[in-house]
Amino acid sequence: MIGTIDIEAIRTDYPVSSVVGGVTKLQRAGREWKACCPIHADRTPSFTIYSGDQRWHCFGCGEGGDVLDFVQKLHHVGLREAADMLTGSNLPVVAMPKIEKPSEPERDTIREAVEIWRSSGPIGGTPAEQYLRGRGISIRLPDCLRFARLPFGRRRYLPALVALVAGPDDQPCGIQRIFLTDDGKKANLPDGKVKFSLGRIRGGAIRLAPGAVSGMILSGSVEDGLSLMEIEGRAVWAAPGEEMLSGMFLPEPVRSVVIGADADDAGMRFAVKARDKFASEGRMVRVIIPANGAKDFNQELQEMAL
Ligand SMILES: [Zn+2]
C-alpha cells in the first residue's frame, strides 16, 4: 500500500464519538462523552472523549490519543491499517449529535439571553404567576420560569414571563419571553404575537422538569407543558414553539417519548415530524392529543376544573 495518510482529514471526517459509538454506548457529559472503555475490561465509564471530538483518554488503562490511535489500540493494528480500516468503511461508524461551538454573533445573543435570565426574579406573586394561575395551572411552578420587566420596542417596558432554554450540553442557551399585562393577561401587541425567543434555542428545551428521565412528555409550549405535567403527573420538557419540537435534543437516558400535540393541522404536522425524528433515534414514541375536543392541553386542563 502506497500513498501518504492525511491524518488531519481523517480526524475531521471521523469524529472520535462516531467510531467509539459504533462499538460501545456513549453518554453525554456536558461537552464531553463518557463510556465504558472498549479497550480494557471496564465496569465504570473511565473512557472520556473530550470537547471538540478529536481526542480521547481512558483513566482506567491510561491509553489515549486521536481517532487513529483508538482504532490501532482496539484492533491491534498499525497506523496504516487503522487509516485503511477507517477510510475503507470497514468499521461501524455512527452519527452522534454534534455539539457545535456557537458563532460569535450567536454567542452574543446567548450572552444577552443569559443576562436577562440572571437579572430576572422569582415568579411567585408576579403577573407571570398570575398569568399561569389564570390558565388553570395549579402545580408548583418550576425554577426555569421567572419574571422580569423587559423592553418591548423602543419606548416601553412590559411585564414578561421569562423561560430558560437549556441546550444539548445542559447549559443555558437562550430564553423565551411571554409579554404580559400588569394584571397577568397576554399583552396586546401587534399581530397578537406575545412570545419572543432570544439566543440559540434550536435543539434546546424549557425543562419544566429539571432532569431527563427514561419516559418523558414533550410539548410545544410552556402553558401546554405545565398542563400536561398537572394532568399526567409526569416529567415534561417544552419546546419554545411547536415547530421546534422535532429539533429538540434528547439525552441518552430518554428511551420513550410522548408528544402532546395541539388538536389542529399544524399541531399534528409538527408532532408527526418530531415522532419520526425521535423514532429514528431508536426511541419509543407516541403522539397524544387533548380529550373532549379541546384545542390544546391547557384547554383540557381548564375544562377538567369546571
Ligand atoms: Zn481503558
Image (cartoon, helix red, strand yellow):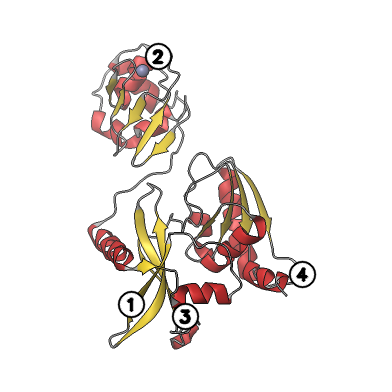
Q: Quadrant of residue 261?
A: bottom right
- Residue corresponding to mark 2: 40
* Vertical position of residue 102 compared to residue 108: above or below: above
- Residue corresponding to mark 4: 292
Mark pair 3, 4: CA separation: 27 Å
Mark pair 1, 4: CA separation: 38 Å
Ligand 1 is within 8 Å of the C-beta of the residue at disc 2? yes
Helix, strand or loop at disc 2?
loop
Q: Decide which of tag 1 and tag 3 comes sooner along the chain.
A: 1
Residue located at (38% from left, 44% from top): 98
- Residue corresponding to mark 3: 193
| Identity, as a three-letter code, of the amino acid under mark 3 | Lys
Q: If the image is split into quadrants, where does the N terminus sit? A: top left
* Vertical position of residue 132 compared to residue 71: above or below: below
Q: Decide which of tag 1 and tag 4 comes sooner along the chain.
A: 1
Question: Who is closer to the viewer here, 51 or 156?
Answer: 156
Q: Decide which of tag 4 and tag 2 comes sooner along the chain.
A: 2
Q: Nearer the viewer, mark 4 or mark 2?
A: 4
Can residue 1 be seen here? no
**Residue 184 drawn at (x, y percent):** 49, 81
Mark pair 4, 2: CA separation: 57 Å
Ligand 1 is within 8 Å of the C-beta of the residue at disc 3? no
Question: Residue pushed farthest top?
Answer: 76
Helix, strand or loop at disc 1?
strand
Q: Nearer the viewer, mark 2 or mark 1?
A: 1
| Identity, as a three-letter code, of the amino acid under mark 4 | Asn
Q: Nearer the viewer, mark 3 or mark 4?
A: 4
Q: Decide which of tag 3 and tag 4 comes sooner along the chain.
A: 3
Helix, strand or loop at disc 4?
loop
